[in-house]
Image: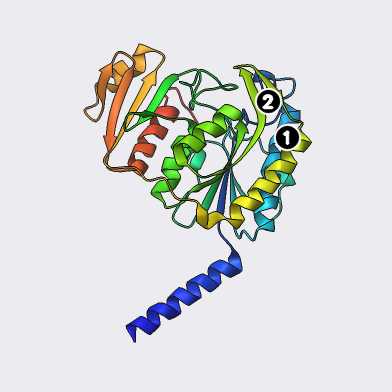
């Protein structure tokens, strides 16, 4: 009888999944968009920023259209660049929910939990310790020089793969310049990718047009969801060691007063957590806290 009940529950679960389709989280950054190369496209003070908000929105919409064409169910979008208020939310379908602004748990992976079946990284860029890549940095170009997990330097994409992997979700698609997508591929293995531009320097690229990028992203998103079972979550050993290297001395000096941190050199602090969720929470605090913050 127990065996029959188990088979029945499995059948019901499969039927629900097949009916609703896989649940997808789409995290959208801006530096990896087609055409993005300097501050002029990336923030409210830039003369091209408003245009690139449209391009960012269109690349996200392309990922949504492709996923839906392949049978995706619920889709959650995380606006993960700058102030977290870049996407033109009125352009999205009514059944899409969008996470905006900061602070928020899991940072660029906000919305991740055990219900997510696959994650797409749209408009991502290379890491701060990479010698190539357009606008290459890791979380904060102004504050950080390196972020490591268990001794390995992270990009925002590989960090996302570890956070998603904790919840059993694989990265299924990454888009950006050729350096950024290669970083994620080298780390996670099999993943759909769209290279929208070739990095020539920190502030230069040979880029395709926004319309061309949208077409490729939609097609790759559809492929990714259709073969979602091919991708594997990225798993790491625990406990998890986080090393954060700051550009300046003062953060490490202050954090060294707290017994949970170890100052391993003049610019680096270390934290050891029981798992990636604990480490991610500590990192979010490091990125967001300031004694000058007010409502």
In the displayed structure, 56 sits above or below 48; it is below
Q: Position of residue 215 (x, y in %)?
A: 74, 43
The furthest residue to the left: 259
Quarter holding the N terminus is bottom left
Residue 105 visible in the snapshot: no
Disc 1, SS = helix
Q: Secondary structure at mark 2?
A: loop
Give yes or no for contact between labels 1 and 2 (Cβ–Cβ under 8 Å): yes
Name the residue tied to disc 2: 36
Q: Position of residue 188 (x, y in %)?
A: 46, 41
Horizontal placement of 128 versus 48: left or right? left
Most extreme residue toward the bottom, as rendered? Answer: 1
Q: Residue at x 54, y 44 (%)?
A: 191
Q: What residue appears at the point 57 percent right and 22 percent down from the top-left corner?
A: 133
Q: Residue at x 26, y 20 (%)?
A: 263
- For this view, does 98 lie left or right of residue 153? right
In percent of the image, x 49 and y 25: which residue is there?
127
Viewer-closest of 214 and 57 = 214
User: Which is more N-terminal, label 2 or label 1?
Assistant: 2
Describe the colour scheme in one phrase.
rainbow
- For the residue carrying disc 2, how many other residues have a C-alpha within 10 Å: few (<14), some (14-19), or many (20+)? many
Relative height, residue 223 to residue 33 (above, below): below
Residue where numbered disc 1 is placed: 55
On screen, residue 251 versus residue 17, left or right, reads: left
Q: Pointer 1: residues within 10 angstroms few (<14), some, or many (20+)?
A: many
Cα distance between the residues tagged 1 and 2 = 10 Å
Residue 156 can be seen, yes or no: yes
Question: Depth check: 256 or 66 in front?
Answer: 66
Q: Position of residue 210 (x, y in %)?
A: 75, 34
Place residue 202 in its image quadrant.
top right
Give x and y (percent) for residue 226: 61, 57
């Amino acid at each position: 009888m127990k065996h029959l009940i188990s088979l029945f529950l499995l059948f019901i679960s499969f039927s629900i999944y097949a009916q609703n389709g896989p649940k997808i989280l789409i995290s959208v950054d801006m530096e990896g968009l087609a055409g993005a190369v300097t501050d002029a496209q990336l923030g409210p003070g830039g003369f091209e920023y408003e245009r690139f908000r449209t391009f960012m929105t269109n690349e996200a919409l392309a990922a949504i259209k492709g996923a839906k064409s392949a049978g995706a169910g619920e889709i959650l979008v995380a606006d993960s660049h700058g102030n977290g208020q870049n996407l033109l939310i009125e352009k999205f379908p009514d059944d899409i929910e969008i996470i905006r602004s900061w602070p928020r748990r899991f940072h660029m992976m906000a919305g991740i939990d055990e219900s997510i079946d696959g994650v797409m990284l749209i408009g991502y860029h290379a890491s701060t310790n990479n010698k190539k890549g357009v606008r290459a940095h890791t979380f904060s170009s102004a504050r950080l020089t390196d972020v490591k997990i268990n001794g390995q330097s992270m990009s925002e994409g590989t960090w996302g793969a570890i956070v998603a992997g904790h919840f059993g979700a694989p990265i299924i698609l990454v888009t950006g310049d050729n350096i950024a997508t290669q970083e994620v591929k080298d780390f996670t293995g099999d993943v759909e990718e769209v290279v929208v531009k070739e990095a020539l320097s920190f502030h230069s690229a040979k880029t395709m047009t926004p319309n061309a990028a949208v077409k490729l992203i939609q097609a790759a998103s559809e492929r990714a969801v259709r073969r979602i079972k091919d991708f594997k979550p990225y798993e790491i050993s625990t406990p998890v060691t986080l090393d954060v290297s700051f550009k300046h001395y003062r953060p490490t000096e202050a954090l060294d007063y707290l017994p949970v941190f170890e100052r391993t050199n003049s610019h680096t602090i270390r934290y050891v957590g029981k798992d990636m969720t604990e480490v991610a929470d500590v990192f979010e605090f490091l990125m967001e806290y300031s004694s000058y913050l007010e409502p």
